[in-house]
């Protein structure tokens, strides 16, 4: 007798059976500085107003028009005209999946600088595409222009991701190098601007000059990581292809309304981002001043720093209730590197005090 469970499992792809699920570190009770979340919530009066808005929604209906309206509202918020295409994902993670699916032909290649955001490679592998990671320059985590152009010429990638700024290095790469990469690319170039609220520049000008360039943004780092709204901007002819792959009801009625509410109160979020940019500079200066620590300048809401023993420092901070991210194992260029999300002034004061005593 065959075991029906074993038979069913045998139908699952062997690479899926061999894979591990994405693990989120448990964080209950900890000072959570591991995931580039905005530490601020809405002020209480706005929480109440949002609650009333959500309570009045017709949750018995599938989302429809509101999703399309939100897409256009986000495009307007970004400052692009109505001729620019836009589509929404359940977080930009979903958009990365849809973009990968759109180019997923046998033998196709996805290319990105490494170390970079892990989902580019994970989703390329899920769709059985080749993934080519091109190492960044070791000392400053800038793009290695010659290596990028050589890899593009060799692998002819259908899809290139450039995170602007990059995660986990928080670098905003040289705009001239990016322009030349976009010109050399035989396929799509996605500028992943998840950290745009904290950066001094964006890629909308490049997108207007280079029709193969798309810009992807998210409301997560803006302050709505729990809401899950990502958006993709670009030439309508390209965005329309991704739109065909979008599950029709991927943005819940609740998510869309919360996103509209956030846009109506964009000034509140802009003030939070301004505060976090200031705090980032304070944290950077303080990290640089710690003995044995090297921090890299950041254009995001996180700071990458090398310490003498990342595993020991990570564990000591965790034992003191401070959760950060140990990125050392991600890539050889990140040996002994930790990533600190910028928190509130009090969060950062506590982090620095705990870190100082862990390192002494
Ligand atoms: N892109 C980058 C560079 C990121 O760091 C992240 C999340 N950490 C994402 C995309 C995914 O964001 P979202 O919450 O919109 O799925």
Image: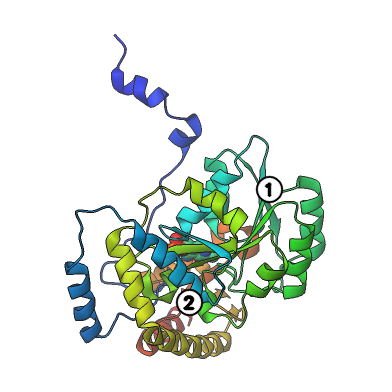
Residue at x 54%, y 85% (from the top left corner) = 284
Q: Quadrant of residue 204?
A: bottom right
Q: Where residue 252 sits in the image (x, y, percent)? A: 31, 58
Q: Which badge, 1 or 2, comes first in the chain's sequence?
A: 2
Q: At numbered mark 2, what does the secondary structure look like: helix, strand or loop?
A: helix
**Residue labelled with disc 2:** 77
The residue at 46%/36% (across/down) is 16
| Residue 161 pos. (x, y %) | 63, 58
Residue that mark 1 sits on? 158
Identify which residue is drawn at 72% across, 65% down: 210
Is there any visible trace of residue 242 in the rendered image? yes
Closer-to-camera residue (331/258): 258
Q: Quadrant of the N terminus?
A: top left
Indicate left or right for 74 with 239 as reference. Answer: left
Q: Please tell me whether residue 10 is drawn above or below residue 28 in the rendered image.
A: above
Relative to residue 187, is residue 180 drawn left or right? Answer: right
* Label 1, ligand 1: CB separation under 8 Å: no
Q: Is 76 or 266 nearer to us in this picture?
A: 76
């Amino acid at each position: 007798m065959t075991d029906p469970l074993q038979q069913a499992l045998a139908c699952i792809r062997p690479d899926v059976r061999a894979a591990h699920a994405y693990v989120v570190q448990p964080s209950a009770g900890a000072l959570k500085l591991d995931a580039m979340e905005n530490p601020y919530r809405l002020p209480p009066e706005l929480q109440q107003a949002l609650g009333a808005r959500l309570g009045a929604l017709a949750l018995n209906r599938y989302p429809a028009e509101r999703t399309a309206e939100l897409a256009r509202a986000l495009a307007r918020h970004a400052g692009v005209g109505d001729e620019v295409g836009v589509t929404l994902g359940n977080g930009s993670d979903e958009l990365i999946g849809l973009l990968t699916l759109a180019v997923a032909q046998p033998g196709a290649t996805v290319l990105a600088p490494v170390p970079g955001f892990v989902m580019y490679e994970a989703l390329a592998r899920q769709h059985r595409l080749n993934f080519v990671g091109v190492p960044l320059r070791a000392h400053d985590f800038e793009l290695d222009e010659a290596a990028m152009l050589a890899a593009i010429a060799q692998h002819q990638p259908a899809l290139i991701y450039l995170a602007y700024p990059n995660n986990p290095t928080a670098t905003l790469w040289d705009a001239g190098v990016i322009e030349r990469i976009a010109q050399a690319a035989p396929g799509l170039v996605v500028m992943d601007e998840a950290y745009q609220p904290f950066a001094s520049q964006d890629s909308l000008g490049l997108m207007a000059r280079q029709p193969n360039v798309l810009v992807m943004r998210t409301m997560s780092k803006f302050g709505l990581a729990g809401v899950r709204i990502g958006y993709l901007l670009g030439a309508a002819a390209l965005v329309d292809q991704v739109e065909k792959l979008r599950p029709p009801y991927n943005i819940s009625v609740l998510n869309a309304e919360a996103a509209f509410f956030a846009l109506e109160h964009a000034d509140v979020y802009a003030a939070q981002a301004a505060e976090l940019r200031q705090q980032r500079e304070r944290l950077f200066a303080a990290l640089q001043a710690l003995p044995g620590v090297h921090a890299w300048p950041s254009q995001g809401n996180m700071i990458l720093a090398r310490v003498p023993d990342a595993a020991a420092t990570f564990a000591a901070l965790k034992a003191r209730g401070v959760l950060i991210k140990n990125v050392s194992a991600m890539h050889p260029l990140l040996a002994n590197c930790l990533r600190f999300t910028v928190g509130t002034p009090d969060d950062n004061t506590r982090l620095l005090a705990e870190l100082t005593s862990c390192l002494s």
